[in-house]
Image: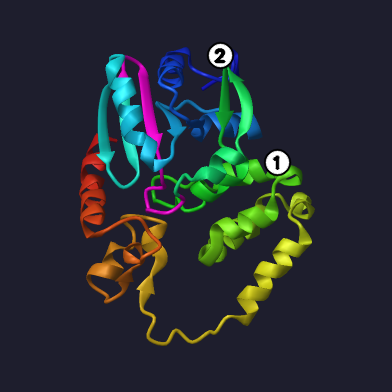
Amino acid sequence: MSRETGKGNRHHRRSVVALQDADIPFLIGGAYVVEVYAGVSRQTKDFDLYLRPQHVDLAVKALKRVGYKTEKIFPHWLAKAERGRDCVDLIFRAGNGLCEVDDSWFERAHNSNFLGLEVKLCAPEEMIWMKAYIMERERFDGADIAHILQSCAAKLDWPHLVRRFGLDWRVFLSHLVLFGYIYPGERDKIPTAIMDDLIARLRSEKRAAGANRICNGTLLSRKQYLLDVRERGFRDARLQARVHMNAKDIAHWTRAIAKEESER
């Protein structure tokens, strides 16, 4: 994506028009909104569109009708559509089964113009939430989060962000601590009340692990903590009721690692 093309690739305009013509609600996210909110531009192959889970199949059919090759590549979070140079990711959750796109995403969306079309963008809070869990060896989205915080901190709904992370507030705190390291002169952009609350939680936690042998690392990386659940007796956090994954999804998501590594 580049500002020289009006914050968007004209090849992607076709997919936006196709979904609008089919009256399917969607949001633009990913690298496009990082550029809009934080001014950070980078070339990406895929164009990220976010939809509620119940609208994904309708979107796939709408794009297929206008000539896209489509596939629900990972049924627990992602479908893809391709037509020429237009490569679209239809995202309805994070790859770890969390961060489901719900009504709140649309209620908080920002209105924008995309190559002459009226569209809605994912709110920066939702992008922070979604990106916070991406900590693979080959991809870490912490820089995107730091740039969004640096640019948008004064306008963020901080209580909403804390609620979004819920039980995973440690993940959020880790990014806030990292932000203070990256931008030591900007630490005051993070509300004191938010930092105080999260640090107080940290201090009040029980230190003893007890019988809770669970590895939350699998929510951060699909590969790097497989050893823990396969050989070291830890339970896979992705099998918790709050995560939209089952054993079949996890196996499919894991098998794809080798294929994707061979393509890089």
Part of the protein shown in magenta: 82-99
Query: Which residue extends farthest front?
Result: 23
Nearest to the observer: residue 170 or residue 81:
81
Q: Is residue 41 left or right of residue 65?
A: right
Which residue is identified by label 2? 115
The residue depicted at 29 percent of the width and 35 percent of the height is 264
- Residue 153 percent location from the top left of the image: 72, 46
Dot 2 lies on which element?
loop
Q: Is residue 131 left or right of residue 81?
A: right
Question: Residue 88 lies in magenta, yes or no?
Answer: yes
Res. 81 image quadrant: top left
Sort mark 1 into few (<14), some (14-19) or many (20+) by Cα contacts within 10 Å: some
**One can see residue 178 in this view:** no
- Residue 199 percent location from the top left of the image: 67, 71
Q: Is residue 104 left or right of residue 99?
A: right
User: What type is the residue that disc 2 sits on?
Assistant: Leu
Which residue is identified by label 1? 152
Q: What is the spatial separation of the Cα atoms under label 2 and label 1, in whole angstroms?
A: 23 Å
Question: Residue 223 lies in magenta, yes or no?
Answer: no
The residue depicted at 42 percent of the width and 57 percent of the height is 220
User: What type is the residue that disc 1 sits on?
Assistant: Cys
Dot 1 lies on which element?
helix
Look at the numbered discs 2 and 1 and tell me whether their residues touch, using CB distance below 8 Å.
Answer: no
The residue depicted at 63 percent of the width and 28 percent of the height is 111
